[in-house]
Amino acid sequence: MRPSLHALAFALLLLAGAAAHAEVKVEFEAPVNLFLDRSLILFSPTPIRRYGDPQSPSPLLFEAQVAPNLFFPQLSAGDIRKPSGEWVFTAILTPHITLRMLNEKSSPVIPPSFMPKVTFQFLRLRLLDPTPGGHRRALALGAHVIVGHYSNGQAGCFFASQAGTDPDCTPEDGEPPLNETAGDFSTNFVRWELHGRLAFDLDGASMTGWVVGGHAGFERNLSIGPGGITEQIRGVYGDSHADVALLGERLWSGHRLHLEATLSRPFGGVEGQGPTVRVEALAAPHWAAGFGLYARYVGGRDYYNILFLEPVHLWQFGLSFELGPGARLREAVTQHASNHP
């Protein structure tokens, strides 16, 4: 059984167990929206390095991450206000695209990153009883199985020392440096993620409180199917990647201040890639309807397709967009606050 079918079968079995004690509902219009990608428009004072580009390092004019999350009908069972909580299962299609435009003579858009993926998401949501001090709390747990593709849409040879077009490159074998201006980069992958959020000191009526949490992820590169990773790319890029993150949020009057730190590293591939650290900050006013001011620092290796061997200390600033957790979840928190004054 393929990983995506494993995820679907596992989620349906768990949902069936929950359904034995509660009615299964299908949500079409107001799905719970947690633990998913955001869209970004970023600017940076940090130049971008590309081997083979005579103007490198080049100033980054802007970077855009377009990641709409398209929900399939969402299944749920249970009640978020009861001790057993609510169980939610859904599938989300994300046509994830990232592109960079460099501030060179022709302001070129360098080969973009295509990462379409399907996320099978299983959630457990629970509004906890107030603490002895009267503080209200909520818990959200999530498990993801993600199946996707990652490429840059190029047909050049992977190594700079090779001539021709992929797969007819000479010599057949090569070694770094990579053809970072036009080289082919492609892999399929399966990724597993665990997420957790604890909200406390909640006031549902005024949408005020604190949130702490984190996630852990493990991603395996696959040669299965069109666009799968080749042994040549695997030997440099690696077999898999893992990451862990910690985060905190302050909520007040519906406004959000979010801080998150992520540590990631590859396994396999060429030696010396090492870990990469990413620190993100987001300030999202309630009245901005999902938009927020965003800043990010990336230290380690570049995350942009075939540039993964380039060392970076990248500072970025711009706008973020992500939808809230959903009207149904907000309504449940507000009602919980009213029932526990």
Image (tube, rainbow, N blue to C red):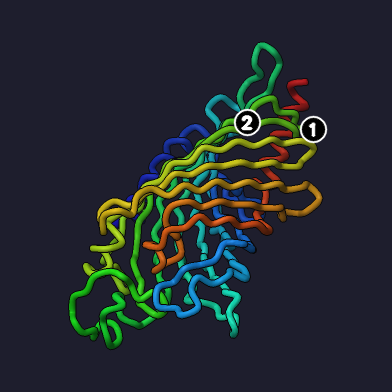
Asked where in the image residue 118 lies, by quadrant, the reply is: bottom left
Residue furthest out toward the top: 132
Query: Which residue matches tag 1?
Result: 205
Residue at the image position 69 percent from the left and 20 percent from the top: 135
Q: Are marks 2 and 1 in contact (CB under 8 Å)?
A: no
Residue at the image position 45 percent from the left and 60 percent from the top: 303
Q: Which mark is residue 199?
A: 2
Amino acid, disc 2? Ala
| SS at mark 2 in the image | strand
Mark 2 neighbour density, 10 Å: few (under 14) some (14–19) many (20 or more): many
Query: In this view of the protein, which residue sits in the foreground, 15 or 253?
Result: 253
Residue 300, percent from left and from top: 43, 52
Query: In this view of the protein, which residue sits in the foreground, 267 or 29?
Result: 267
Q: Of label 2 and label 1, which has the lower sequence position?
A: 2
Position of 16 relative to 100 (above/below) = above
Q: Which mark is residue 324?
A: none
| SS at mark 1 in the image | loop
Residue at the image position 41 percent from the left and 47 percent from the top: 264
Amino acid, disc 1? Ala
Separation of marks 2 and 1 at Cα, in angstroms: 15 Å
Quadrant in the picture for the C terminus: top right
On screen, residue 329 versus residue 337, left or right, reads left
Mark 1 neighbour density, 10 Å: few (under 14) some (14–19) many (20 or more): some
Quadrant in the picture for the N terminus: bottom left
Residue at the image position 58 percent from the left and 70 percent from the top: 59
On screen, residue 58 versus residue 146, left or right, reads right
